[in-house]
Image (tube, grey):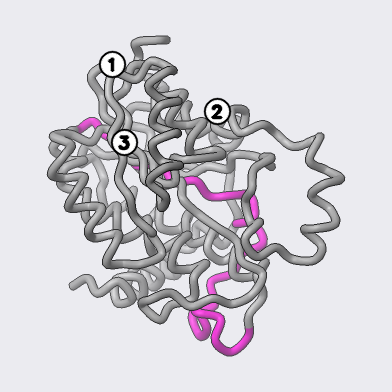
Amino acid sequence: MTAIMAGRTVLVTGGTSGIGLATAVGLGAMGARVAITGRDRARSELAADEIRAAGSPSVDVFLADLSHQAEVRRLADDALAALPRIDVLVNNVGGYWNHRHVTADGLERTFALNHLAPFLLTHLLLERLKESSPARVVTVSSNAQAMGRIDFDDLQGEQSYSGARAYNQSKLANVMFTYELARRLGTDGVTANALHPGVVSTSFGAEDPAGLQRLLVPLIRPFMKSPSQGAATSIHVASAPDLEGVTGRFFARSRARRSSKRSYDVEAAGRLWRASENLVGMP
């Protein structure tokens, strides 16, 4: 197991803490060359040191705030310049905000970071992934997708905003994007799968928490998974030999599961894809 990822390169977004860091550490310990993204240089370098200590032969650090599309594009350019191959892209970065925030692109931040960032980054890196095939796109969603609904009339929460509703929508969008990507790629050598990591004890949502979150999290934290436990499914989907060629699936506890009924709506997935292309300025 320690050499199962030897010779492979993995890019993990949001790899400086929590599930992302634990995922990078785990894959690095399996012999992968690991690249991570983060917003703060000092924190990113500390994370890189931890990944190296776990056994990764090489660690690359890219600084970017992925809620800004210009930085997603710069990240892609930097990654393509530095990484001759990308065998696995782990779309891990995400967030939760109780109040509505607007990005530099004028977009609602939850939708921009949780869905549009992985949508755009995956497209910008797709040719390199194909060149490195067999390759994998692994997107961290959540069981919150089961409560999600894509509000095409108010994707940005301009008319009515709820932190929970925005988050649930973005996590459903992750799964629908994954399934549509798998359909479009077909047998092109790149698989696309999404996953639920479990309820994990991290600083997730601490930047702008809901009142209920402030009350409940301290009470249930002892029962939450550790980041390394939460990363187990990401690591499995990114590395398991028996998943080579498996695509368009949703995983929880390292096993394929059914996602919500809405997530299998092919027509809605196509509509979401086209709306996302427009929002990120893709032809």
Distance from the alpha carbon under mark 2 to that under mark 3: 18 Å
Q: Quadrant of the N terminus?
A: top left
Which structural element holds mark 3?
strand
Indicate which disc, 2 or 3, sits on the residue closer to the N terminus: 3
Q: Measured from the top left, where is residue 267 in percent x and y?
A: 42, 69
Q: Residues within 10 Å of mark 2 (few under 14, many from 20)?
A: many
Which stretch appears magenta?
133-160
From the image, tell me which residue sits under label 2.
232
Find out whether residue 155 is within the magenta segment. yes
Q: Looking at numbered disc 3 in the image, what kind of residue is underneath it?
A: Ala
> Which element type, helix, strand or loop, lies under badge 1?
loop
Q: Position of residue 188 (x, y in %)?
A: 20, 41
Circle nearer the N terminus (1, 3): 1
Q: Classify 229 as above or below 55.
A: below
At label 2, which amino acid type do we have?
Answer: Ala
Quarter-wise, where is residue 266 in the image?
Answer: bottom left
Residue 35 numbered mark, or none: 3
Q: CA distance from mark 1 to mark 2?
A: 18 Å
Residue in view at x 28 percent, y 16 percent: 6
Q: Residue at x 48, y 68 (%)?
A: 111
Question: Neighbour class for label 3 at 10 Å: few (<14), some, many (≥20)?
Answer: many
Mark 1 lies on residue: 6
| Residue 168 seen anywhere in this rendered image of the structure | no
Choose top left, top right, bottom left or bottom right for residue 64: bottom left
Residue lying at the far front in this picture: please name it: 42
Q: Nearer the viewer, residue 87 or 79?
A: 79
